[in-house]
Image: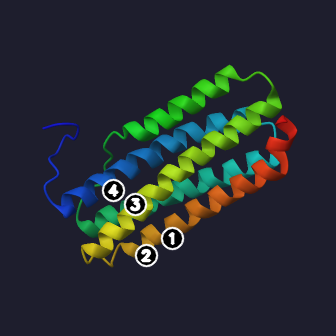
Amino acid sequence: MGLFTTPIKTLDDLFLHTLKDIYYAENQITKALPKMIEKTTNETLKSALTHHLTETKTQITRLDKVFQTLGKSPEGTKCDAIVGIVDEAEQIMSDVGDKNVLDAAIASSAQAVEHYEISRYGTLIALAKQLGRKDVVPQLEETLKEEKQADQKLTDVANAQVNRMAA
């Protein structure tokens, strides 16, 4: 059967698998962000991460609604990509001693998470449109917009503060 627990034979199967993937990822992110927030010393970065933690919880609720619209129970499927990104972030956070470099590392790790989420939501939107599932597109687009805004905020904080302080 390969890497996936359920065979992916149709575009519908791929859409559902990707939805389960991001559902798992978002739930893992709600566990990882508090650790990043705790270790961050830059208040602007801490505020951005805290805001995104709240957004992530709302995004999970939005995904619950997408599953409901599809007539499916909300469930995740293990996402090795987000596991790897989170593991790498935790490793980097444990290896960095300088607080300013740590803040830069946290911002960088958070952006890796955002970029993964942006790619997943973009894919979900494209698949939903192709499948004629316009009933779930608005929820997915709202989350994609938030992910892009979070990424931009992290870029702004990194460029204006944390990278400069780390240098």
Quadrant of the frame with the C terminus: top right
Q: Secondary structure at mark 1?
A: helix
Q: Which mark lies nearer to you, 2 or 3?
A: 2
**On the image, which quarter does residue 132 sit in?**
bottom left
Whether label 1 touches label 2, CB < 8 Å:
yes
- How many other residues sit within 10 Å of disc 3, few (<14), some (14-19) or many (≥20)? many
Question: Which disc number belongs to residue 63?
Answer: 3
Image side of residue 99 versus residue 150, left or right: right
The disc, 2 or 4, on the residue closer to the chain's N-terminal end is 4
The disc, 2 or 3, on the residue closer to the chain's N-terminal end is 3
Whether label 4 touches label 3, CB < 8 Å:
yes
Quadrant of the frame with the N terminus: top left
Question: Which disc number belongs to residue 138?
Answer: 2
The disc, 1 or 4, on the residue closer to the chain's N-terminal end is 4
Image side of residue 117 versus residue 19, left or right: right
The disc, 1 or 3, on the residue closer to the chain's N-terminal end is 3
Compute the Cα span from label 1 to label 3: 11 Å
Compute the Cα span from label 4 to label 3: 8 Å
Q: Secondary structure at mark 3?
A: helix
Q: Residue at x 25, y 67 (%)?
A: 70
Question: What residue does disc 4 label?
Answer: 19
Q: Position of residue 125 (x, y in %)?
A: 38, 68
Question: What residue does disc 1 label?
Answer: 142
Q: Amino acid at mark 2?
A: Pro
Front one among 81 and 22 = 81
Q: Position of residue 36 (x, y in %)?
A: 66, 36
Q: Residue at x 46, y 33 (%)?
A: 84
Q: Amino acid at mark 3?
A: Leu
